[in-house]
Amino acid sequence: MNAQGEITVDVQFACDDADSPDAEIICGWVRIAVAEAGVEVTGDAEVSVRVVDIDEIRTLNRDYRDKDEATNVLSFPAGKIDGLPAEAVQTLGDVVVCAAVVRDEAASQARELADHWAHMLVHGTLHLLGYDHMTDADAMEMEGLESRILATQSVADPYRS
């Protein structure tokens, strides 16, 4: 439970990947990101996280972003639902993470795999909360927040060499 309310995280594993963190770790990172983001989430909220293979992430990236390539993480914010009773659980959206891409990136960037997973989960969750990196100013704000959130859990800054 955080100051905003209970954050429920539904974790789905759509691929077999022995290197993926377990559901408890995934839930923890999503909850930390929500708690530390500085965005007001009133009442209870929920986030879905789906761990997928390269084919699924590539299809989603192609269908929703017109990029026919695999990527590490995609976020699908739910947005505000008009008429939702105040006591209803607020759906923040879905985060989709490709286990193989995250593993390959961690190796190629000489990063700890667990740290890279943490970064992708925080990054994806921040997108659900309205953060983006489309402009230089937005990128600086989002990346700074990501770094600060990760540092609270002793994860190295992913934007420093």
Image (cartoon, grey):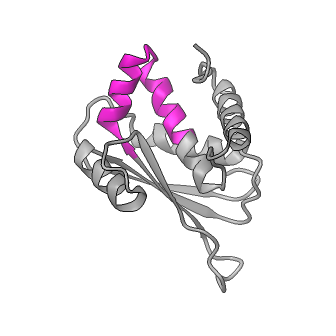
The main secondary structure of the magenta stretch is: helix
In the image, what residue occupies the spot 54% across and 57% down?
8
Question: Do we see residue 28 in this rendering?
Answer: no
Mark count: 0
User: Is 87 positioned to the left or the right of 124 in the image?
Assistant: right
User: Is 100 positioned to the left or the right of 10 in the image?
Assistant: left
In the image, what residue occupies the spot 51% across and 45% down?
27
Up/down of 56 relative to 160, above or below: below
Residue situated in front as seen by the camera: 122 or 18: 122
Question: What range of the chain is rendered magenta?
Answer: 97-122
Up/down of 159 relative to 37, above or below: above
- Assess whether residue 110 is covered by the magenta stretch: yes
Residue situated in front as seen by the camera: 138 or 127: 138
The percent position of residue 32, horizontal first and vertical second, equals: 63, 41
Question: Do we see residue 12 in this rendering?
Answer: yes
The percent position of residue 28, horizontal first and vertical second, equals: 55, 41
In the image, what residue occupies the spot 53% across and 46% down?
124
In the image, what residue occupies the spot 38% across and 41% down?
71
Farthest bottom residue in view? 83
User: Is 28 positioned to the left or the right of 52 in the image?
Assistant: right
The percent position of residue 91, horizontal first and vertical second, equals: 56, 67
User: Is 58 positioned to the left or the right of 120 in the image?
Assistant: left
Quarter residue 4 falls in: bottom right
